[in-house]
Image (spheres, rainbow, N blue to C red):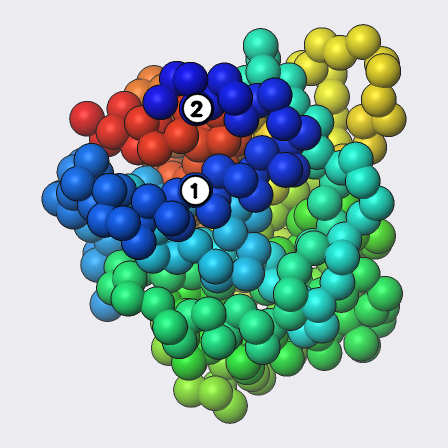
Amino acid sequence: MKLAFFLLRLLPPEKSHFVALNALKFFYKLKIIQFFFPYKDSGTSFSFKGLKFKNRLGIAAGLDKNGDFIDPLGALGFGFIEIGTVTPLAQPGNSKPRVFRFSSQGAIVNRLGFNNKGVDYLVNRIKSRTYKGVLGINIGANKDSEGQKRIDDYIECFSKVCPYADYIAVNISSPNTPNLRSLHLEENFLPLFEALSVARNEEEYTKPIFIKLSPDEDKKIISVILDAIKEYEFDGVITSNTTINKDNLSYSGRHNLDGGLSGKPLLSKSNELLKIAHSHNPNLLKVGVGGVDSKESFNSKLDLGASLVQIYTSFIYHGPEIVKRLLS
């Protein structure tokens, strides 16, 4: 296993990601994954709005953007899986290179830009899954969509995925799609929230809707969003997305580091947002994500009010073993 990870790190980050996930899928088909990571109830189960999470640890959106790896990821022991971010139309994302490792700091910077194969492809992949656990779907807007067209993108994705989603995560916080974070401004998020509320009623969608927030907004802006989430009776927040602040990252300046920072250096900022959200509304469900790579950091999310926790970067660096480590 250690040799495999060493060899993967010799590849460019995005290529390594592709190879690793396809290897996971290959071993799943051979039933090797199931042998080493058998289905079992590790950790503490959790129930919310009729959903039964076998444990509180999930994989965050961004790892499996298109729903190609639901079954192999589901075999690793996660309590839930979130796929996406998906957009109405397929798009290539931003130009390469767009993923940068900082292994010694347990960090990654990416500026992928919602690269995905489109919502219709994702829905077809979901239809073929055998995974029976909780499946969340993260939705977004195409890069060139602005104004009402951007809202329409979210609603198109919502309507197409809602028959298959155990919960829907609305991504208004990626730093890698131009102007997407302007949806944290009241004049922009209120029309989106209104449209989502109407779509929820029209589609008779009764399962949870979560809003994924940025860790880079000030407390006043976050408070206004949290008030609106309560008003529209959405169910929770995901705290948080990546940060554009690189103050906690040591680097040589060899690369243009535009993009979002994830991993260990994100822990404090994501925890601060989690603390704000819990203080503002203790009854709102919180999904804590950002910087979780140890039992201590996992528990810090729960202690600050998260009911569920997600990982991404630590899974990239440590592979399936991180699931055992966090849940043991």
Image vertical order of residue 279 relative to residue 154, above or below: above
Q: For the residue marked with disc 2, what is the amino acid? A: Ala
Residue at numbered disc 2: 4
As drawn, the label of residue 46 is none
- Which residue is at the far front? 30
What number of labels is visible?
Answer: 2
Q: CA distance from mark 1 to mark 2?
A: 11 Å
Graded by Cα atoms within 10 Å as few (under 14), some (14 to 19) or many (20 or more), the crowding at tag 1 reads few
Q: Residue at x 84, y 52 (%)?
A: 178
- Observer-nearest of 214 and 316: 316
Q: For the residue marked with disc 1, what is the amino acid? A: Ala
Quadrant assignment, res 207: bottom left
Task: Provide residue 45's location: percent of width, then percent of height.
Answer: 18, 47
Q: Secondary structure at mark 1?
A: helix
Q: Is residue 139 left or right of residue 254?
A: left
Residue at numbered disc 1: 23
